[in-house]
Image: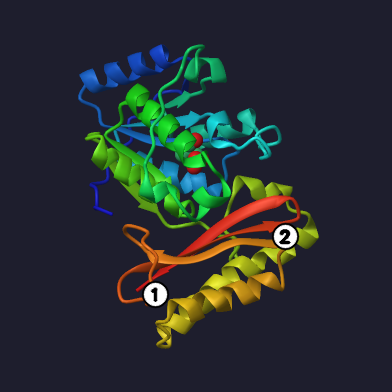
Amino acid sequence: MTDAPTRPPVRQSLVTCATPDEMSAWSRAARARSERIAFVPTMGALHDGHVALLREGRRRGDRLALSIFVNPTQFGPSEDLGRYPRDLPGDLARASDAGVDVVFLPDRAAMYPPGHQTTVQVQELASGMCGAGRPGHFVGVATVVCKLFNIVQPEVAIFGEKDFQQLALIRRMVRDLNMPIEIVGLPTVREPDGLALSSRNRFLSSDDRTRAVSISRALFAARARFESGERDAARLTSDVRGALEGAVDRVEYVELRDAQDLRPLDAVDRPAVIAVAVHVGGTRLIDNVRFG
Ligand code: PAF
C-alpha cells in the first residue's frame, strides 16, 4: 500500500445518485474542479470494516464516493441474494458520519438494463478458493466493479482484505484493462474476540456466533506455528482444517496461497495467505491471515 498525504476534508451535504448518468455527472463536475475522487464500492449493511474503508477514502481523496448495490450477478441461484441484509437508513447515517460526499444507489435495472450482455472475466485468479464453491461469482464481481469504476471514475478505490481473492482479482483487472485507478487494500477489522466483521454476521445465532470464533482462532494459531518455524503448507492447512472441523458445520476450503498471485504453495518461502470459507448455521463466512 502506498502512503498518501492527508488531505483536508472538503465537505458538503450527502448527495445521492440513483442512475449512472447522475453519478457520472457528479464525478465529471468534481474532476473538472481537479478534485481527486476516492471510492468505496459496497453492498450496504455497513459495519465498522466498511467505515475503516471510508475513513481511508476520506484521507486519500478530496471527494469520497460510496456505492451501495446488492449485485445480483455475483450470487448463485441457491445463495442468499434474497435475504442479503439491507439497511439503507443506517447506511446513510454511517456514510454521513464517515464524511461521504456522494452515495451511488442504483437499482438492478439501472445497472443491468434489458439487453445487457457484456461481462468481465479474470481467468486464473477466479478459479479455486471462493471461485470453486461459487461458480460465476467472480464474473459478477469483476463486471460490476468494472462498471462502477467506469461510472464513478475514481482515482483511488479502497477494498477490504477479508475478501482476499476479490482484492487480488480487482488489482489484476485494473492492470489488465489499463484502468488508471489506484487499488488500496486495508486489513480486516475484527471483533475483540477475533471474528472478522461481515455483513452476514448478523445472521449468526448466539451458538453460531460462539462457534464462528474458531475461524480466526484457527488462523491465528497457524500464523503462530509459522512464526515458530513451521513452513510446510500441508501441515499448516491441515491444522486449520482440523480445528475448524470440530467447530463449524462445513469447511468449504482451507488454502495456503502466494499472497501476490494466489498460486498454491507447498512451502511458505514467500509472503503467503491462508484463506478459508466455512459454513456456520446457514451462513457462509470467509477469513484469512497473511504471513511470511
Ligand atoms: O465486496 C463487496 O461488497 C462486493 O463484492 C463489491 C466489491 C461491492 C461488488 O459488488
Coloration of the structure image: rainbow
> Would residue 276 be visible to someone looking at this image?
yes
* Amino acid type at mark 2: Arg
- 242 shown above or below 79: below
* Left or right: 152 as drawn, with respect to 221: left
- Give residue 191's position: percent from left, percent from top: 60, 60
- 289 shown above or below 232: above
Between circles 1 and 2, the one closer to the viewer is: 1
Q: Which mark is residue 209?
A: 2
| Quadrant of the image containing the N terminus | bottom left
Residue 20 lies in quadrant: top left
- Give residue 195's position: percent from left, percent from top: 60, 62
* Left or right: 151 as drawn, with respect to 31: right
Q: Which residue is mark 1?
A: 266
The residue carrying pointer 1 sits among few (fewer than 14), some (14 to 19) or many (20 or more) residues within 10 Å by Cα, namely some
Cα separation between marks 1 and 2: 32 Å
- Give residue 208's position: percent from left, percent from top: 75, 59
Which residue sits at x=52%, y=74%?
237
> Would residue 11 be visible to someone looking at this image?
no
* Amino acid type at mark 1: Asp
The mark that comes first in sequence, 1 or 2, is: 2
* Left or right: 62 as drawn, with respect to 242: left
The residue carrying pointer 2 sits among few (fewer than 14), some (14 to 19) or many (20 or more) residues within 10 Å by Cα, namely some
Q: Secondary structure at mark 1?
A: loop
